[in-house]
Amino acid sequence: MTDGRFRVLVTDEVDPEGVAILRAHPDIIVVEKPTRPAPEVLEEIGEYDAFVGRSATRVSKEFLQAGERLKVIGRAGVGVDNVDIPTATQLGVAVINAPGGNTVSVAELAFGVLIGLARNLPAAWDSMHSGRWDRSKLGGTELRGKTMSIIGVGRIGGEMARRARAFGMHVIGYDPYIGPGRFEELGIERADRLNDALDRADVLTVHVPLTPETTGMIGAPELSRLPRQAFVLNLARGGVVVEDALVDALRSGRIGGAALDVFDVEPLPADHPLRTVPNLVLTPHLGASTRDAQRNVAVEACEAVRDALVTGDLSAAINAAGVGGAGMRELRPLLLLADRLGRLGRALVPGALTSLEVRYTGPRGEAPRPLLLSALQGALRDVVERRAINLVNAQHVAAERGIETASTRVEGRGELGEEIELRLEGGERSIRVGGALLGETHGRIVRIGAFRVDVAPRGVLLVLRNRDVPGVIGRVGTLLGEASVNIAEYHQARLQVGGEALAAVSVDSRIPAEVIERLAALPEILDVRQVDME
Protein backbone atom coordinates (compact mmCIF):
# COMPACT_ATOMS: atom_id res chain seq x y z
CA MET A 1 0.00 0.00 0.00
CA THR A 2 1.04 3.61 -0.66
CA ASP A 3 -0.07 6.20 1.92
CA GLY A 4 -2.55 3.64 3.16
CA ARG A 5 -3.95 3.08 -0.34
CA PHE A 6 -3.67 0.16 -2.76
CA ARG A 7 -1.98 0.68 -6.14
CA VAL A 8 -3.53 -1.20 -9.09
CA LEU A 9 -1.98 -1.50 -12.55
CA VAL A 10 -4.59 -1.80 -15.33
CA THR A 11 -3.59 -2.67 -18.89
CA ASP A 12 -4.74 -4.44 -22.08
CA GLU A 13 -7.55 -1.91 -22.71
CA VAL A 14 -9.87 -3.09 -19.97
CA ASP A 15 -13.32 -1.53 -20.45
CA PRO A 16 -13.63 1.91 -18.81
CA GLU A 17 -16.73 0.95 -16.81
CA GLY A 18 -14.69 -1.64 -14.93
CA VAL A 19 -11.78 0.73 -14.35
CA ALA A 20 -14.20 3.33 -13.01
CA ILE A 21 -15.23 0.94 -10.24
CA LEU A 22 -11.64 0.81 -9.02
CA ARG A 23 -11.11 4.55 -9.36
CA ALA A 24 -14.25 5.26 -7.34
CA HIS A 25 -12.87 3.70 -4.17
CA PRO A 26 -10.90 6.12 -1.98
CA ASP A 27 -8.44 3.42 -0.88
CA ILE A 28 -7.37 2.52 -4.44
CA ILE A 29 -4.96 4.31 -6.79
CA VAL A 30 -5.35 3.20 -10.42
CA VAL A 31 -2.51 3.45 -12.93
CA GLU A 32 -3.75 2.65 -16.44
CA LYS A 33 -1.24 1.86 -19.20
CA PRO A 34 -1.40 0.28 -22.68
CA THR A 35 -0.22 -3.25 -23.38
CA ARG A 36 3.58 -3.28 -23.34
CA PRO A 37 6.44 -5.78 -23.79
CA ALA A 38 7.06 -8.06 -20.82
CA PRO A 39 10.42 -6.51 -19.80
CA GLU A 40 8.78 -3.10 -19.34
CA VAL A 41 6.02 -4.53 -17.15
CA LEU A 42 8.53 -6.50 -15.05
CA GLU A 43 10.44 -3.33 -14.28
CA GLU A 44 7.51 -1.71 -12.49
CA ILE A 45 5.15 -4.49 -11.31
CA GLY A 46 6.86 -4.47 -7.91
CA GLU A 47 5.17 -1.11 -7.20
CA TYR A 48 1.62 -2.53 -7.30
CA ASP A 49 -0.72 -4.41 -4.98
CA ALA A 50 -2.93 -5.69 -7.81
CA PHE A 51 -2.94 -6.15 -11.57
CA VAL A 52 -5.94 -6.17 -13.91
CA GLY A 53 -5.61 -7.12 -17.57
CA ARG A 54 -6.91 -9.27 -20.38
CA SER A 55 -5.09 -11.98 -22.34
CA ALA A 56 -2.41 -9.82 -23.97
CA THR A 57 -0.19 -9.55 -20.88
CA ARG A 58 1.28 -12.85 -19.71
CA VAL A 59 1.34 -13.20 -15.93
CA SER A 60 4.35 -15.50 -15.80
CA LYS A 61 6.41 -16.87 -12.94
CA GLU A 62 8.89 -14.01 -13.46
CA PHE A 63 6.04 -11.49 -13.40
CA LEU A 64 4.70 -12.85 -10.11
CA GLN A 65 8.11 -13.07 -8.48
CA ALA A 66 8.88 -9.48 -9.46
CA GLY A 67 5.55 -8.31 -8.04
CA GLU A 68 6.60 -8.51 -4.42
CA ARG A 69 3.59 -6.49 -3.27
CA LEU A 70 1.02 -8.30 -5.41
CA LYS A 71 -2.05 -9.57 -3.61
CA VAL A 72 -4.51 -9.99 -6.50
CA ILE A 73 -4.43 -10.71 -10.24
CA GLY A 74 -7.64 -9.80 -12.05
CA ARG A 75 -8.35 -11.30 -15.48
CA ALA A 76 -11.08 -9.43 -17.35
CA GLY A 77 -12.30 -12.58 -19.07
CA VAL A 78 -12.92 -16.26 -18.45
CA GLY A 79 -9.70 -17.96 -19.48
CA VAL A 80 -6.64 -17.81 -17.25
CA ASP A 81 -4.27 -19.62 -19.63
CA ASN A 82 -1.98 -16.59 -19.49
CA VAL A 83 -1.62 -16.76 -15.69
CA ASP A 84 0.82 -19.07 -13.88
CA ILE A 85 -1.68 -20.17 -11.26
CA PRO A 86 0.61 -22.62 -9.38
CA THR A 87 3.18 -19.88 -8.81
CA ALA A 88 0.49 -17.37 -7.86
CA THR A 89 -0.90 -19.80 -5.30
CA GLN A 90 2.54 -20.56 -3.91
CA LEU A 91 3.20 -16.84 -3.45
CA GLY A 92 -0.21 -16.17 -1.93
CA VAL A 93 -1.55 -14.11 -4.84
CA ALA A 94 -5.28 -14.49 -5.47
CA VAL A 95 -6.25 -15.04 -9.13
CA ILE A 96 -9.65 -13.69 -10.11
CA ASN A 97 -11.42 -14.06 -13.44
CA ALA A 98 -14.86 -13.11 -14.76
CA PRO A 99 -16.60 -16.37 -15.63
CA GLY A 100 -20.08 -14.95 -16.15
CA GLY A 101 -19.50 -11.80 -18.16
CA ASN A 102 -19.18 -13.29 -21.65
CA THR A 103 -21.55 -16.22 -21.23
CA VAL A 104 -24.35 -14.94 -23.44
CA SER A 105 -22.00 -13.59 -26.11
CA VAL A 106 -20.30 -16.97 -26.53
CA ALA A 107 -23.59 -18.88 -26.58
CA GLU A 108 -25.08 -16.52 -29.16
CA LEU A 109 -22.03 -16.85 -31.42
CA ALA A 110 -22.18 -20.63 -31.10
CA PHE A 111 -25.77 -20.69 -32.25
CA GLY A 112 -24.99 -18.22 -35.00
CA VAL A 113 -22.32 -20.46 -36.53
CA LEU A 114 -24.46 -23.54 -35.94
CA ILE A 115 -27.31 -22.04 -37.93
CA GLY A 116 -24.78 -21.04 -40.56
CA LEU A 117 -23.62 -24.65 -40.85
CA ALA A 118 -27.14 -26.10 -40.85
CA ARG A 119 -28.29 -23.74 -43.63
CA ASN A 120 -25.00 -23.57 -45.60
CA LEU A 121 -24.72 -19.82 -45.09
CA PRO A 122 -20.94 -19.55 -45.68
CA ALA A 123 -21.29 -21.31 -49.05
CA ALA A 124 -24.37 -19.23 -49.90
CA TRP A 125 -22.49 -16.01 -49.11
CA ASP A 126 -19.57 -17.07 -51.29
CA SER A 127 -21.90 -18.11 -54.10
CA MET A 128 -23.80 -14.83 -54.17
CA HIS A 129 -20.68 -12.65 -53.94
CA SER A 130 -19.16 -14.67 -56.79
CA GLY A 131 -22.11 -13.89 -59.08
CA ARG A 132 -23.70 -17.35 -58.87
CA TRP A 133 -27.20 -18.51 -57.90
CA ASP A 134 -26.68 -21.98 -56.38
CA ARG A 135 -30.03 -22.35 -54.68
CA SER A 136 -30.43 -26.01 -55.68
CA LYS A 137 -27.04 -26.94 -54.20
CA LEU A 138 -27.52 -25.29 -50.85
CA GLY A 139 -30.29 -27.26 -49.19
CA GLY A 140 -29.87 -27.37 -45.42
CA THR A 141 -31.36 -29.06 -42.37
CA GLU A 142 -33.53 -27.97 -39.46
CA LEU A 143 -32.32 -27.99 -35.86
CA ARG A 144 -35.73 -28.96 -34.53
CA GLY A 145 -35.81 -32.58 -33.48
CA LYS A 146 -32.05 -32.96 -33.56
CA THR A 147 -29.91 -33.91 -30.53
CA MET A 148 -27.31 -31.57 -29.13
CA SER A 149 -24.63 -33.07 -26.86
CA ILE A 150 -23.00 -30.50 -24.61
CA ILE A 151 -19.63 -31.39 -23.10
CA GLY A 152 -19.23 -29.20 -20.01
CA VAL A 153 -22.46 -28.03 -18.40
CA GLY A 154 -21.20 -24.85 -16.77
CA ARG A 155 -22.43 -21.32 -17.41
CA ILE A 156 -21.98 -21.34 -21.18
CA GLY A 157 -23.08 -24.96 -21.48
CA GLY A 158 -26.24 -24.02 -19.59
CA GLU A 159 -26.95 -21.12 -21.95
CA MET A 160 -26.45 -23.45 -24.90
CA ALA A 161 -28.98 -25.87 -23.41
CA ARG A 162 -31.59 -23.13 -22.98
CA ARG A 163 -31.23 -22.01 -26.57
CA ALA A 164 -31.23 -25.56 -27.91
CA ARG A 165 -34.50 -26.30 -26.16
CA ALA A 166 -35.98 -23.10 -27.60
CA PHE A 167 -35.11 -24.48 -31.05
CA GLY A 168 -36.91 -27.72 -30.25
CA MET A 169 -33.75 -29.80 -29.86
CA HIS A 170 -33.21 -32.69 -27.48
CA VAL A 171 -30.26 -31.96 -25.19
CA ILE A 172 -27.76 -34.40 -23.68
CA GLY A 173 -25.01 -33.26 -21.33
CA TYR A 174 -21.79 -34.79 -20.10
CA ASP A 175 -20.02 -33.28 -17.10
CA PRO A 176 -18.73 -35.54 -14.31
CA TYR A 177 -18.26 -32.54 -12.01
CA ILE A 178 -21.87 -31.36 -12.06
CA GLY A 179 -24.57 -32.85 -9.85
CA PRO A 180 -27.92 -34.21 -11.08
CA GLY A 181 -29.80 -31.12 -9.88
CA ARG A 182 -28.13 -28.92 -12.49
CA PHE A 183 -29.16 -31.26 -15.30
CA GLU A 184 -32.75 -31.36 -14.05
CA GLU A 185 -32.88 -27.58 -13.76
CA LEU A 186 -31.77 -27.17 -17.39
CA GLY A 187 -33.88 -30.01 -18.77
CA ILE A 188 -30.81 -31.94 -19.93
CA GLU A 189 -30.52 -35.70 -20.20
CA ARG A 190 -27.42 -36.65 -18.24
CA ALA A 191 -24.84 -38.90 -19.92
CA ASP A 192 -22.76 -41.00 -17.55
CA ARG A 193 -19.95 -41.43 -20.05
CA LEU A 194 -18.51 -39.23 -22.79
CA ASN A 195 -19.10 -41.96 -25.37
CA ASP A 196 -22.82 -42.02 -24.51
CA ALA A 197 -23.04 -38.32 -25.42
CA LEU A 198 -21.00 -38.77 -28.60
CA ASP A 199 -23.00 -41.69 -29.96
CA ARG A 200 -26.21 -39.64 -30.19
CA ALA A 201 -24.89 -36.17 -31.05
CA ASP A 202 -26.24 -34.54 -34.19
CA VAL A 203 -24.50 -31.47 -32.80
CA LEU A 204 -21.47 -31.77 -30.51
CA THR A 205 -20.43 -28.61 -28.67
CA VAL A 206 -17.64 -28.43 -26.10
CA HIS A 207 -17.49 -25.90 -23.26
CA VAL A 208 -14.66 -27.00 -20.98
CA PRO A 209 -11.43 -25.33 -19.83
CA LEU A 210 -8.11 -26.51 -21.23
CA THR A 211 -6.59 -28.83 -18.63
CA PRO A 212 -4.46 -31.98 -18.82
CA GLU A 213 -7.71 -33.92 -18.63
CA THR A 214 -9.42 -32.07 -21.50
CA THR A 215 -6.44 -31.62 -23.85
CA GLY A 216 -7.16 -33.76 -26.92
CA MET A 217 -10.52 -34.74 -25.42
CA ILE A 218 -12.16 -34.90 -28.88
CA GLY A 219 -9.80 -36.73 -31.23
CA ALA A 220 -10.14 -39.24 -34.05
CA PRO A 221 -11.69 -42.03 -31.90
CA GLU A 222 -14.32 -39.64 -30.51
CA LEU A 223 -15.13 -38.09 -33.90
CA SER A 224 -15.60 -41.57 -35.37
CA ARG A 225 -18.41 -42.27 -32.89
CA LEU A 226 -20.53 -39.33 -34.01
CA PRO A 227 -23.51 -39.95 -36.30
CA ARG A 228 -22.65 -39.25 -39.92
CA GLN A 229 -23.08 -35.61 -40.94
CA ALA A 230 -22.92 -34.38 -37.33
CA PHE A 231 -21.73 -30.85 -36.62
CA VAL A 232 -18.85 -30.13 -34.22
CA LEU A 233 -18.45 -26.78 -32.40
CA ASN A 234 -15.47 -25.64 -30.36
CA LEU A 235 -15.77 -22.12 -28.94
CA ALA A 236 -14.07 -23.05 -25.66
CA ARG A 237 -10.31 -23.53 -25.85
CA GLY A 238 -7.89 -24.54 -28.58
CA GLY A 239 -6.49 -28.00 -27.91
CA VAL A 240 -9.72 -29.60 -26.69
CA VAL A 241 -10.54 -30.76 -30.24
CA VAL A 242 -7.60 -32.32 -32.08
CA GLU A 243 -7.25 -30.18 -35.19
CA ASP A 244 -5.62 -32.81 -37.46
CA ALA A 245 -8.35 -35.32 -36.62
CA LEU A 246 -11.02 -32.72 -37.36
CA VAL A 247 -9.44 -31.95 -40.75
CA ASP A 248 -9.46 -35.65 -41.66
CA ALA A 249 -13.10 -36.10 -40.55
CA LEU A 250 -14.23 -33.11 -42.64
CA ARG A 251 -12.23 -34.01 -45.75
CA SER A 252 -13.55 -37.58 -45.68
CA GLY A 253 -17.14 -36.44 -45.26
CA ARG A 254 -17.37 -38.37 -41.98
CA ILE A 255 -18.94 -35.36 -40.27
CA GLY A 256 -21.13 -32.71 -41.87
CA GLY A 257 -19.38 -29.58 -40.72
CA ALA A 258 -17.61 -27.80 -37.91
CA ALA A 259 -17.04 -24.37 -36.42
CA LEU A 260 -13.92 -23.23 -34.57
CA ASP A 261 -13.44 -19.97 -32.74
CA VAL A 262 -10.31 -21.13 -30.86
CA PHE A 263 -7.10 -22.78 -32.06
CA ASP A 264 -3.97 -24.54 -30.87
CA VAL A 265 -1.92 -21.57 -32.06
CA GLU A 266 -3.34 -18.07 -32.20
CA PRO A 267 -3.32 -16.16 -34.46
CA LEU A 268 -3.98 -19.04 -36.84
CA PRO A 269 -1.11 -19.20 -39.40
CA ALA A 270 -2.06 -18.05 -42.88
CA ASP A 271 -1.08 -21.40 -44.42
CA HIS A 272 -2.74 -23.59 -41.82
CA PRO A 273 -4.61 -26.64 -43.26
CA LEU A 274 -7.78 -25.59 -41.44
CA ARG A 275 -8.13 -22.65 -43.84
CA THR A 276 -8.63 -24.97 -46.83
CA VAL A 277 -11.08 -27.48 -45.33
CA PRO A 278 -14.65 -27.60 -46.74
CA ASN A 279 -17.67 -26.83 -44.59
CA LEU A 280 -15.64 -25.37 -41.74
CA VAL A 281 -16.58 -22.01 -40.24
CA LEU A 282 -13.55 -20.23 -38.77
CA THR A 283 -13.74 -17.11 -36.58
CA PRO A 284 -10.77 -15.34 -34.95
CA HIS A 285 -11.61 -15.97 -31.27
CA LEU A 286 -14.68 -13.74 -31.30
CA GLY A 287 -16.61 -15.45 -28.51
CA ALA A 288 -16.31 -12.59 -26.04
CA SER A 289 -15.82 -9.87 -28.64
CA THR A 290 -18.97 -7.88 -28.06
CA ARG A 291 -19.22 -4.51 -26.37
CA ASP A 292 -21.57 -6.04 -23.85
CA ALA A 293 -19.24 -8.91 -22.94
CA GLN A 294 -16.17 -6.70 -22.60
CA ARG A 295 -18.08 -4.35 -20.33
CA ASN A 296 -19.48 -7.22 -18.29
CA VAL A 297 -16.18 -9.02 -17.72
CA ALA A 298 -14.42 -5.77 -16.84
CA VAL A 299 -17.07 -4.85 -14.28
CA GLU A 300 -17.12 -8.36 -12.82
CA ALA A 301 -13.34 -8.61 -12.51
CA CYS A 302 -12.82 -5.10 -11.15
CA GLU A 303 -15.54 -5.46 -8.54
CA ALA A 304 -13.94 -8.69 -7.35
CA VAL A 305 -10.44 -7.15 -7.26
CA ARG A 306 -11.75 -4.18 -5.27
CA ASP A 307 -13.46 -6.46 -2.74
CA ALA A 308 -10.39 -8.67 -2.40
CA LEU A 309 -8.15 -5.70 -1.67
CA VAL A 310 -10.44 -3.67 0.54
CA THR A 311 -12.44 -6.29 2.44
CA GLY A 312 -10.39 -9.47 1.96
CA ASP A 313 -13.27 -11.22 0.18
CA LEU A 314 -11.69 -13.99 -1.91
CA SER A 315 -14.92 -15.66 -3.04
CA ALA A 316 -14.11 -14.88 -6.68
CA ALA A 317 -10.54 -16.22 -6.51
CA ILE A 318 -10.14 -19.45 -8.46
CA ASN A 319 -7.17 -20.49 -6.30
CA ALA A 320 -8.89 -19.89 -2.95
CA ALA A 321 -11.97 -22.10 -3.22
CA GLY A 322 -14.37 -21.89 -0.28
CA VAL A 323 -13.01 -18.58 1.02
CA GLY A 324 -15.31 -15.58 0.89
CA GLY A 325 -18.80 -14.98 -0.34
CA ALA A 326 -21.70 -13.25 1.32
CA GLY A 327 -20.93 -14.79 4.71
CA MET A 328 -17.26 -13.74 4.73
CA ARG A 329 -17.90 -10.58 6.72
CA GLU A 330 -19.80 -12.50 9.38
CA LEU A 331 -17.01 -15.07 9.57
CA ARG A 332 -14.26 -12.53 10.17
CA PRO A 333 -14.31 -12.63 13.99
CA LEU A 334 -14.07 -16.43 13.81
CA LEU A 335 -11.28 -16.29 11.23
CA LEU A 336 -9.34 -13.88 13.41
CA LEU A 337 -9.79 -16.16 16.42
CA ALA A 338 -8.65 -19.21 14.40
CA ASP A 339 -5.56 -17.32 13.25
CA ARG A 340 -4.68 -16.41 16.84
CA LEU A 341 -5.26 -19.95 18.05
CA GLY A 342 -2.96 -21.18 15.28
CA ARG A 343 -0.23 -18.82 16.46
CA LEU A 344 -0.71 -19.89 20.07
CA GLY A 345 -0.75 -23.62 19.33
CA ARG A 346 2.31 -23.44 17.11
CA ALA A 347 4.28 -21.62 19.83
CA LEU A 348 3.49 -24.40 22.29
CA VAL A 349 4.47 -27.30 20.00
CA PRO A 350 8.19 -28.10 19.83
CA GLY A 351 9.90 -29.02 16.58
CA ALA A 352 8.36 -29.11 13.11
CA LEU A 353 4.59 -29.01 12.87
CA THR A 354 3.28 -32.29 11.46
CA SER A 355 -0.49 -32.07 11.89
CA LEU A 356 -3.22 -29.48 12.42
CA GLU A 357 -6.89 -30.26 12.91
CA VAL A 358 -9.75 -27.83 13.40
CA ARG A 359 -13.06 -28.64 15.03
CA TYR A 360 -15.78 -26.03 14.80
CA THR A 361 -18.93 -26.14 16.91
CA GLY A 362 -21.63 -23.88 15.59
CA PRO A 363 -24.36 -23.30 13.01
CA ARG A 364 -22.27 -22.18 9.99
CA GLY A 365 -21.91 -25.03 7.53
CA GLU A 366 -19.43 -23.12 5.38
CA ALA A 367 -17.07 -22.32 8.28
CA PRO A 368 -14.69 -25.33 8.64
CA ARG A 369 -12.54 -24.83 5.54
CA PRO A 370 -11.93 -21.07 5.97
CA LEU A 371 -11.23 -21.68 9.66
CA LEU A 372 -8.68 -24.36 8.79
CA LEU A 373 -6.95 -22.03 6.34
CA SER A 374 -6.94 -19.22 8.87
CA ALA A 375 -5.51 -21.50 11.58
CA LEU A 376 -2.78 -22.63 9.16
CA GLN A 377 -2.09 -19.00 8.33
CA GLY A 378 -1.50 -18.26 12.00
CA ALA A 379 0.49 -21.41 12.70
CA LEU A 380 2.83 -20.97 9.71
CA ARG A 381 3.19 -17.19 9.79
CA ASP A 382 6.65 -17.08 11.36
CA VAL A 383 8.11 -20.37 10.16
CA VAL A 384 8.02 -20.16 6.37
CA GLU A 385 10.52 -18.40 4.17
CA ARG A 386 8.22 -16.60 1.79
CA ARG A 387 6.83 -13.12 1.39
CA ALA A 388 3.29 -13.97 2.45
CA ILE A 389 1.23 -16.64 4.11
CA ASN A 390 -2.49 -16.14 3.68
CA LEU A 391 -5.76 -17.87 2.91
CA VAL A 392 -4.72 -18.35 -0.72
CA ASN A 393 -1.56 -20.35 -0.13
CA ALA A 394 -1.96 -21.72 3.40
CA GLN A 395 -3.11 -25.17 2.27
CA HIS A 396 -0.39 -25.28 -0.41
CA VAL A 397 2.31 -24.39 2.10
CA ALA A 398 1.04 -27.02 4.55
CA ALA A 399 1.10 -29.72 1.86
CA GLU A 400 4.54 -28.58 0.74
CA ARG A 401 5.82 -29.09 4.29
CA GLY A 402 4.09 -32.44 4.77
CA ILE A 403 1.63 -31.13 7.37
CA GLU A 404 -1.54 -33.21 7.59
CA THR A 405 -4.72 -31.16 7.90
CA ALA A 406 -8.37 -31.82 8.69
CA SER A 407 -11.48 -29.88 9.63
CA THR A 408 -14.79 -30.99 11.11
CA ARG A 409 -18.00 -29.37 12.28
CA VAL A 410 -20.22 -30.19 15.23
CA GLU A 411 -23.76 -28.89 14.78
CA GLY A 412 -25.40 -26.75 17.41
CA ARG A 413 -23.72 -24.37 19.80
CA GLY A 414 -20.99 -24.98 22.32
CA GLU A 415 -21.18 -24.25 26.01
CA LEU A 416 -19.86 -20.72 25.43
CA GLY A 417 -21.33 -20.06 21.97
CA GLU A 418 -19.54 -20.75 18.69
CA GLU A 419 -16.34 -22.61 19.54
CA ILE A 420 -13.12 -23.49 17.73
CA GLU A 421 -10.69 -26.15 18.90
CA LEU A 422 -7.30 -26.78 17.29
CA ARG A 423 -5.22 -29.90 17.76
CA LEU A 424 -1.59 -29.49 16.71
CA GLU A 425 1.17 -32.09 16.61
CA GLY A 426 4.89 -31.52 16.33
CA GLY A 427 7.89 -33.56 17.43
CA GLU A 428 6.56 -35.99 20.02
CA ARG A 429 4.01 -33.63 21.49
CA SER A 430 0.46 -32.60 20.70
CA ILE A 431 -1.63 -29.85 22.21
CA ARG A 432 -5.18 -28.60 22.05
CA VAL A 433 -6.07 -24.94 22.17
CA GLY A 434 -9.59 -23.60 22.07
CA GLY A 435 -11.48 -20.37 21.66
CA ALA A 436 -15.05 -19.13 21.75
CA LEU A 437 -16.90 -16.28 20.11
CA LEU A 438 -18.84 -14.44 22.78
CA GLY A 439 -21.69 -12.50 21.28
CA GLU A 440 -21.00 -11.88 17.60
CA THR A 441 -17.59 -10.24 17.61
CA HIS A 442 -15.62 -10.93 20.79
CA GLY A 443 -13.25 -13.89 20.60
CA ARG A 444 -11.66 -15.33 23.73
CA ILE A 445 -9.05 -18.04 24.29
CA VAL A 446 -10.75 -20.52 26.60
CA ARG A 447 -8.47 -23.56 26.58
CA ILE A 448 -4.74 -24.25 26.54
CA GLY A 449 -3.97 -27.94 26.82
CA ALA A 450 -5.98 -29.36 29.69
CA PHE A 451 -6.41 -25.96 31.34
CA ARG A 452 -9.49 -23.76 31.14
CA VAL A 453 -8.57 -20.11 30.71
CA ASP A 454 -10.30 -16.89 29.71
CA VAL A 455 -8.13 -14.31 27.97
CA ALA A 456 -8.44 -12.05 24.93
CA PRO A 457 -6.27 -12.93 21.90
CA ARG A 458 -4.61 -9.53 21.60
CA GLY A 459 -1.25 -7.90 22.10
CA VAL A 460 1.35 -10.35 23.35
CA LEU A 461 0.34 -13.47 25.26
CA LEU A 462 2.71 -14.91 27.83
CA VAL A 463 2.05 -18.58 28.64
CA LEU A 464 3.72 -20.05 31.73
CA ARG A 465 3.53 -23.54 33.18
CA ASN A 466 4.42 -23.58 36.85
CA ARG A 467 4.08 -25.54 40.07
CA ASP A 468 0.99 -24.58 42.03
CA VAL A 469 2.69 -23.02 45.05
CA PRO A 470 2.10 -19.71 46.86
CA GLY A 471 3.75 -16.55 45.59
CA VAL A 472 4.17 -17.40 41.88
CA ILE A 473 1.74 -14.75 40.64
CA GLY A 474 3.43 -12.10 42.76
CA ARG A 475 6.93 -12.97 41.63
CA VAL A 476 5.91 -13.02 37.95
CA GLY A 477 4.05 -9.72 38.29
CA THR A 478 6.96 -8.08 40.11
CA LEU A 479 9.49 -9.21 37.54
CA LEU A 480 7.34 -7.92 34.66
CA GLY A 481 6.72 -4.65 36.48
CA GLU A 482 10.41 -4.08 37.04
CA ALA A 483 10.90 -4.51 33.29
CA SER A 484 8.14 -1.93 32.59
CA VAL A 485 5.89 -4.58 30.99
CA ASN A 486 2.24 -3.64 31.48
CA ILE A 487 -0.17 -6.52 32.21
CA ALA A 488 -3.60 -6.30 30.56
CA GLU A 489 -4.99 -9.62 31.84
CA TYR A 490 -3.64 -12.38 34.10
CA HIS A 491 -5.49 -15.69 34.17
CA GLN A 492 -4.28 -18.53 36.40
CA ALA A 493 -5.64 -22.07 36.07
CA ARG A 494 -4.86 -25.36 37.76
CA LEU A 495 -6.05 -28.94 37.57
CA GLN A 496 -5.57 -29.78 41.27
CA VAL A 497 -4.18 -28.16 44.37
CA GLY A 498 -0.39 -28.37 44.52
CA GLY A 499 -0.06 -29.81 41.03
CA GLU A 500 0.78 -28.14 37.75
CA ALA A 501 -0.74 -24.77 36.92
CA LEU A 502 -0.86 -22.56 33.87
CA ALA A 503 -0.89 -18.78 33.56
CA ALA A 504 -2.09 -16.92 30.47
CA VAL A 505 -0.88 -13.34 30.77
CA SER A 506 -1.83 -10.72 28.18
CA VAL A 507 0.70 -7.86 28.04
CA ASP A 508 0.85 -4.71 25.96
CA SER A 509 4.28 -5.15 24.40
CA ARG A 510 6.75 -7.84 23.50
CA ILE A 511 8.85 -8.99 26.46
CA PRO A 512 12.65 -8.69 26.03
CA ALA A 513 14.58 -11.96 25.81
CA GLU A 514 16.48 -11.28 29.04
CA VAL A 515 13.21 -10.92 30.94
CA ILE A 516 11.96 -14.22 29.51
CA GLU A 517 15.21 -15.82 30.71
CA ARG A 518 14.71 -14.41 34.20
CA LEU A 519 11.16 -15.75 34.28
CA ALA A 520 12.34 -19.18 33.15
CA ALA A 521 14.97 -19.12 35.92
CA LEU A 522 12.37 -18.82 38.67
CA PRO A 523 12.35 -22.16 40.54
CA GLU A 524 8.56 -22.56 40.31
CA ILE A 525 8.40 -22.00 36.53
CA LEU A 526 8.46 -25.08 34.29
CA ASP A 527 8.12 -23.45 30.88
CA VAL A 528 7.74 -19.96 29.38
CA ARG A 529 6.47 -19.00 25.91
CA GLN A 530 5.38 -15.67 24.48
CA VAL A 531 3.18 -15.34 21.41
CA ASP A 532 2.54 -12.26 19.28
CA MET A 533 -1.21 -11.98 18.80
CA GLU A 534 -1.16 -8.90 16.56
Image (cartoon, rainbow, N blue to C red):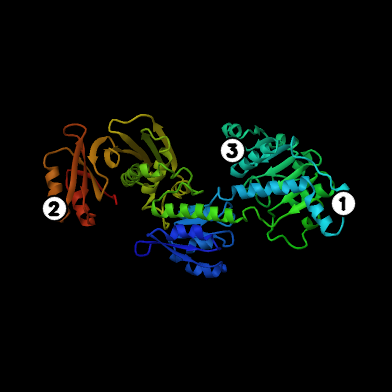
Q: Residue at x 32, y 35 (%)?
A: 418
Number of other residues with Cα within 10 Å of mark 2, as a class: few under 14, some 14 to 19, many 20 or more? few
Number of other residues with Cα within 10 Å of mark 3, as a class: few under 14, some 14 to 19, many 20 or more? few
Residue 191, quarter of the rendered image: top right
Q: Which of the numbered marks, if any, corresponds to residue 369?
A: none
Give the quadrant of the N terminus. bottom left
Residue picked out by circle 2: 481
Which of 407/150 is in front? 150
The disc, 1 or 2, on the residue closer to the chain's N-terminal end is 1
As measured in the structure, the alpha-carbon distance from the residue carrying label 1 to the one carrying label 3 is: 46 Å
The disc, 3 or 2, on the residue closer to the chain's N-terminal end is 3
Which of 438/507 is in front? 438
As measured in the structure, the alpha-carbon distance from the residue carrying label 3 to the one carrying label 2 is: 61 Å
Residue picked out by circle 3: 177
Q: Which of the numbered marks, if any, corresponds to residue 134?
A: 1
| Residue 359 makes an appearance in the image | yes
Residue 254: image x %, image y %? 82, 44
Counting the numbered discs, the total is 3
The disc, 1 or 3, on the residue closer to the chain's N-terminal end is 1
| Residue 240 makes an appearance in the image | no
Q: What residue type is labelled 1?
A: Asp
As measured in the structure, the alpha-carbon distance from the residue carrying label 1 to the one carrying label 2 is: 100 Å
Q: What residue type is labelled 2?
A: Gly
Residue 181, quarter of the rendered image: top right
Q: Which amino acid does label 3 sit on?
A: Tyr
SS for dot 3: loop
Tell me if residue 43 comes above or below residue 531 in the rendering. Answer: below
Q: Residue at x 69, y 37 (%)?
A: 194
Q: Is residue 411 left or right of residue 186?
A: left
Discs 1/3, front: 1
Circles 1 and 2, Cβ within 8 Å, touching? The answer is no
Q: Is residue 309 left or right of residue 114?
A: left
